[in-house]
Amino acid sequence: MKALHMAAYILLWVGGLNWGLWGLLNMNLVETLLGMDLAKFVYILVGVATVYVIATHMKDCKVCAKS
């Protein structure tokens, strides 16, 4: 389960950095590095990772976890 959590966390970083670059520089780094077809797959993975992290956040977060 830790590997799944780490993979989701890394994908959130990828998605967040890509959105930041797109907003600041109008540059889509994922599409530039991987091409349009593979980038679409990465975007789907980022979306799934986001849903996973939202669903499991309370359990994993030290600030939000119930004591």
Image (cartoon, grey):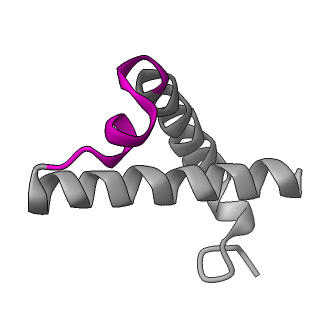
User: Which residue is at 36% across, 60% downward?
Assistant: 17
Q: Which image quadrant for residue 64?
A: bottom right
Which range is magenta? 27-38
The residue lying toward the viewer, choosing from 36 and 7, is 36
The residue lying toward the viewer, choosing from 7 and 27, is 27
The residue lying toward the viewer, choosing from 37 and 5, is 37
Residue 41 is situated, as x and y percent measured from the top left of the image, at 51, 23
Q: Is residue 4 left or right of residue 20?
A: right
Q: Is residue 27 left or right of residue 59?
A: left
Q: Which image quadrant for residue 59?
A: bottom right
Quarter of the C terminus within the rendering: bottom right
User: Which residue is at 37% across, 57% downward?
Assistant: 16
User: Which residue is at 69% across, 73% downward?
Assistant: 65
Residue 57 is situated, as x and y percent measured from the top left of the image, at 62, 59
Q: Is residue 14 left or right of residue 7?
A: left
* Residue 65, above or below 38: below
